[in-house]
């Protein structure tokens, strides 16, 4: 029994000699929010518009997407902030910033960036629809019912359906 107590004491003491972890645990995407953000619409819009993005902004955006996929949210946000300073009217940049902030749990920032994204997004197509969807999610999480209802209504107007052919 004495040896067992001595062994336990030595093991616990040895644990205190291990280096402490200074970094925070890795951030992880919330699968329920991810499912809402990437929900597939039953009907695709026949009109797709893609806003122009400068080469420097496109490069930063692509790097940020890679970091976001690797759950490096802060690094991705830093790259997107640089891209935003270069081209503030890029809805894809602000849309991704809103998406990342949703995953970080910072719903007010997500709402702010989603609002900018929806203001600068094209009026039709996937980017338009996703901008309004992200704004609706952020508004819902903040309890902004009027904003959510408006965003859901605007989201539907982004989709242009093909006319019936006879």
Image (cartoon, rainbow, N blue to C red):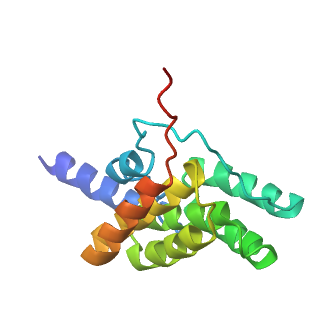
Residue 13 quadrant: bottom left
Please tell me whether residue 94 is drawn above or below residue 62 in the rendered image.
below
Please tell me whether residue 40 is drawn above or below residue 105 in the rendered image.
above
Q: Camera-side residue: 22 or 48?
A: 48
Q: Camera-side residue: 123 or 41?
A: 123
Residue most extreme to the right: 55
**Where residue 139 sits: x, y (%)?**
34, 72
Residue most extreme to the top: 166
Residue most extreme to the left: 1
94 with respect to 135 (left or right): right
Residue at 34%, 75% (x, y): give it: 147
Please tell me whether residue 68 is drawn above or below residue 35 in the rendered image.
below
Residue at 19%, 46% (x, y): give it: 4
Q: Camera-side residue: 79 or 20?
A: 79
38 with respect to 79 (left or right): left
Residue 42 quadrant: top left
Residue at 49%, 48% (x, y): give it: 159
**Where residue 35 sits: x, y (%)?**
37, 45
Residue 21 appears in the picture as rendered: no
**Where residue 52 sits: x, y (%)?**
79, 59
37 with respect to 121 (left or right): left
Residue most extreme to the front: 166
Q: Camera-side residue: 137 or 109?
A: 137
**Where residue 29 sits: x, y (%)?**
43, 52
Residue 161 appears in the picture as rendered: yes
């Amino acid at each position: 029994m004495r040896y067992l107590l001595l062994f336990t004491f030595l093991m616990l003491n040895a644990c205190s000699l291990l280096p402490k972890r200074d970094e925070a645990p890795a951030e992880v995407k919330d699968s329920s929010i991810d499912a809402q953000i990437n929900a597939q619409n039953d009907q695709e819009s026949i009109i797709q518009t893609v806003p122009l993005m400068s080469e420097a902004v496109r490069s930063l955006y692509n790097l940020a997407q890679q970091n976001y996929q690797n759950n490096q949210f802060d690094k991705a946000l830093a790259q997107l902030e640089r891209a935003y300073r270069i081209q503030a009217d890029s809805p894809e940049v602000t849309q991704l910033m809103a998406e990342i902030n949703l995953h970080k749990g910072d719903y007010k920032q997500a709402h702010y960036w989603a609002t900018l994204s929806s203001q600068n997004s094209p009026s039709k197509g996937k980017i338009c629809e996703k901008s309004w969807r992200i704004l609706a999610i952020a508004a819902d999480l903040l309890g902004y019912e009027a904003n959510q209802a408006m965003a859901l209504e605007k989201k539907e107007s982004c989709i242009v359906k093909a006319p019936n052919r006879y």
